[in-house]
Image (cartoon, rainbow, N blue to C red):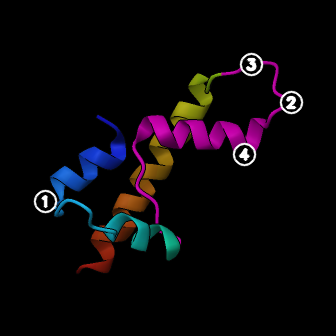
């Protein structure tokens, strides 16, 4: 099951819902450690990197970024 399908299922979206498309059009993204580390790798290492997969450093940055985003969401709801 793809991340998109998992999210739609978790949010209990009806079949054919465009809620995820709506989020994407507004600049929102849903990420986990794997997708965030791949994004960090793509941005900072780029296509010219001497390695193809995210490094441990990319994964550490992904964990830190996700933690910071989660704190922002919690703080915004207080």
Q: Residue at x 45, y 41 (%)?
A: 63
Number of the label disc, if any, that sits on residue 12: 1
Whether tag 2 and tag 1 are in contact, CB under 8 A, the answer is no
Q: Residue at x 18, y 51 (%)?
A: 9
67 to 21, vertically: above or below = above
Q: Which residue is mark 2?
A: 48
Measure the alpha-carbon separation of dots 4 and 1.
32 Å
Q: Residues within 10 Å of mark 3 (few under 14, many from 20)?
A: few
Q: Residues within 10 Å of mark 2 (few under 14, many from 20)?
A: few
Residue 49 sits in which quadrant?
top right
Say what secondary structure mark 3 lies in.
Answer: loop
Q: Which comes before the other along the chain, label 4 or label 3?
A: 4
Q: Which residues are magenta?
A: 27-52
Q: Which comes before the other along the chain, label 4 or label 1?
A: 1
Say what secondary structure mark 4 lies in.
Answer: helix
Name, please, the residue furthest toward the top. 51
Number of the label disc, if any, that sits on residue 51: 3
38 to 14, vertically: above or below = above
Q: Residues within 10 Å of mark 4 (few under 14, many from 20)?
A: few
């Amino acid at each position: 099951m793809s991340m998109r399908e998992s999210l739609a299922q978790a949010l209990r979206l009806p079949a054919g819902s465009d809620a995820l498309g709506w989020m994407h059009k507004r600049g929102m993204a849903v990420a986990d450690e794997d997708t965030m580390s791949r994004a960090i790798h793509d941005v900072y290492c780029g296509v010219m990197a001497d390695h193809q997969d995210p490094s441990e450093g990319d994964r550490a940055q992904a964990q830190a970024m996700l933690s910071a985003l989660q704190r922002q969401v919690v703080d915004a709801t207080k």
